[in-house]
Image (cartoon, rainbow, N blue to C red):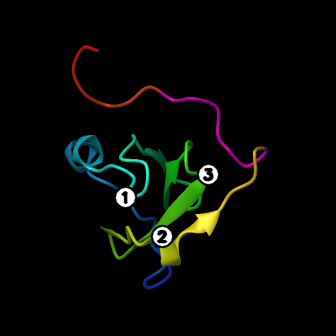
Amino acid sequence: MAADGRDGRKATVDPKLLELLACPLTKGPLTWDPERSELISRVAKLAYPVRDGIPIMLPSEARTISPEDVLPPQPRLGGPS
């Protein structure tokens, strides 16, 4: 079970915050991976960590993900598309 790394609790991201955040490199959407506490940019193939509930949106802090690591598409949270 992945945790945010500090107090052993799982990190979460507010759905409204997820709607506002974008990948700093591609400006594209991000999806939440609750198992690893990361925000995933499928286009950039990067996973941005979330520590203590705070997204670390620095490409230098992101983990490169391989095509097999990319999660299947998930619907974005929010209103009608």
Q: Quick check: 39 left or right of 81?
A: right
**Callout 2 environment at 10 Å: few (<14), some (14 to 19), or many (20+)?**
some
Could you tell me how far apart the alpha carbons at marks 3 and 1 are, in whole angstroms?
A: 12 Å
* SS label for mark 2: helix
**Callout 3 environment at 10 Å: few (<14), some (14 to 19), or many (20+)?**
some
Identity, as a three-letter code, of the amino acid under mark 1: Pro
Q: Nearer the viewer, residue 20 or 51?
A: 20
Whether label 1 touches label 2, CB < 8 Å: yes
Identity, as a three-letter code, of the amino acid under mark 3: Lys
- Mark sitting earlier along the chain (3/1): 1
Residue, far right: 68
Q: Which residues are magenta?
A: 68-74
Q: Residue at x 50, y 81 (%)?
A: 5
Q: Nearer the viewer, residue 51 or 65?
A: 65
- Mark sitting earlier along the chain (3/2): 3
Could you tell me how far apart the alpha carbons at marks 3 and 2 are, in whole angstroms?
A: 11 Å
Could you tell me how far apart the alpha carbons at marks 1 and 2 are, in whole angstroms?
A: 8 Å
Q: What residue did someone put label 1 on?
A: 24
Residue 28 rendering spot, x and y as whole percentages: 40, 41
**Callout 1 environment at 10 Å: few (<14), some (14 to 19), or many (20+)?**
few
Q: Residue at x 39, y 53 (%)?
A: 23
Q: Residue at x 51, y 77 (%)?
A: 60
- Look at the picture and state if 59 lies above or below 17: below
- Look at the picture and state if 16 lies above or below 10: above
Residue, far top: 80
Q: Residue at x 42, y 56 (%)?
A: 25
Residue 79 colored magenta? no
Q: What residue did someone put label 3 on?
A: 45
Identity, as a three-letter code, of the amino acid under mark 2: Pro
Whether label 3 touches label 1, CB < 8 Å: no
Q: Is residue 43 visible?
A: yes
